Amino acid sequence: MTYSITQPCVDVKDLACVEECPVDCIYEGERMLYIHPDECVDCGACEPVCPVEAIFYEDDVPEQWKVYNQVNAEFFDDLGSPGGAAKLGVIDKDHPLVGALPPQEH
């Protein structure tokens, strides 16, 4: 089990969760952040600091955003497990579902 970042993060990318993550498993795409499911240690430190309440424990993702469990996992299909987000910086892509969304207003 892991945590997932959902649609409210799109076009926000506050980064408070990145600063709070003790294992550097939150990666930055072009439009949103993604939690690596194999690197996350389920500590939950990221969830309470998210200003838009976009982070949920995998089983607690609201029904309308359940697909984001898959989105977070699939984002890493071609990246594998880099072992830390900081060394990669912003990754020049997003999951296709995120890329296809219209600009989000917050």
Image: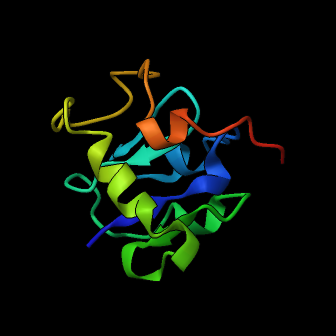
Relative image position of residue 76 (x, y in whole percent): 26, 39
Nearer-the-camera pick, 69 or 20: 69
Report whether 52 appears left or right of 83: right
**Which residue in the rendered view is the most extreme toward the left?**
80
Residue projecting furthest to the top: 92
Report the quarter where the N terminus lies. Answer: bottom left
Q: Residue at x 63, y 49 (%)?
A: 9
Corner quadrant of residue 82? top left
Seen in the picture, residue 83 relative to 9 is either above or below; the reply is above
- Above or below, 17 against 62 in this view is above
Please name the residue shown 67% across and 55% down the image.
8
Q: Is residue 63 above or below residue 91?
A: below
x, y (%) of residue 49?
A: 64, 61
**Left or right of residue 77: residue 67:** right
Q: Residue 98 at what x, y percent from top left?
A: 52, 40
In which quarter of the view is residue 59 placed? bottom left
Residue 77 vertical placement versus 60 (above, below): above
